[in-house]
Amino acid sequence: VQLQASGGGLVQAGGSLRLSCAASGRTFSRSAMGWFRQAPGKEREFVAVIRWNSGTKYYTDSVKGRFTISRDNAKNTVYLEMNSLKPEDTAVFYCAADQGRYVGTVPTNPMAYDYWGQGTQVTVSS
């Protein structure tokens, strides 16, 4: 199983980035796909999640209205569109997938996820 995250970079405050997470190695149709981030000296925190089959989404409050999570079934890829970026969004962003144990839910605890991508750095300058 492999999750390949990409799309990070350096952007000015107010700018936009789109992160991608390409999934391979198993069927993810029953899985929840999540994005998390970890800033230096801080714990990994939940950002957004989407259920692969239903498309149900959930966001942490700090990104609502600015970030959009989506998936492309044909490409087995999940995206995180990030707009109106702020310096406090600076972090390493990780995508993750669960094995499908929590059908119908949108897990926000990183412990619920079984597979992780390698992370992609997002830096927002002021």
Image: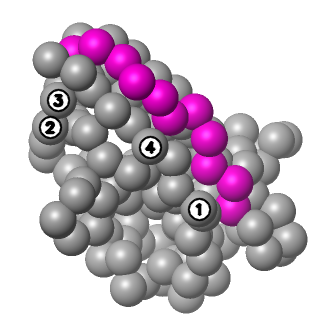
Residues marked 4 and 2 touching at CB (< 8 Å) = no
Nearest to N terminus: mark 1 or mark 2: 2
Provide the residue designation for mark 4: 121
The CA span between labels 4 and 3 is 13 Å
The answer to whether residue 22 is above or below residue 109 is: above
Q: Give the residue at x 17% y 65%.
A: 42
Provide the residue designation for mark 1: 118
**In which quadrant is the N terminus drawn?**
bottom right
Magenta-drawn segment: 3-13
Task: Write down the quadrant of residue 73 in the picture.
Answer: top right
Nearest to N terminus: mark 4 or mark 3: 3
Nearest to N terminus: mark 3 or mark 1: 3
Provide the residue designation for mark 3: 87
Residues marked 2 and 3 touching at CB (< 8 Å) = yes
Dot 4 lies on which element?
strand
Dot 2 lies on which element?
helix
> What amino acid is labelled 4 in the image?
Gln
Image coordinates of residue 59 in percent, x first then y, are 28, 48
Image coordinates of residue 13 in percent, x first then y, are 22, 16
Provide the residue designation for mark 2: 88
On screen, residue 86 versus residue 92, left or right, reads left
Our reading of the magenta stretch's main secondary structure is strand
Regarding residue 71, the answer to whether it shows in the image is no
Q: Is residue 29 magenta?
A: no
Query: In the depicted view, which residue is nearer to us: 93 or 52?
Result: 93
> What amino acid is labelled 3 in the image?
Pro
Dot 3 lies on which element?
helix
Nearest to N terminus: mark 4 or mark 2: 2
Dot 1 lies on which element?
loop
The CA span between labels 1 and 2 is 21 Å
Regarding residue 80, the answer to whether it shows in the image is yes
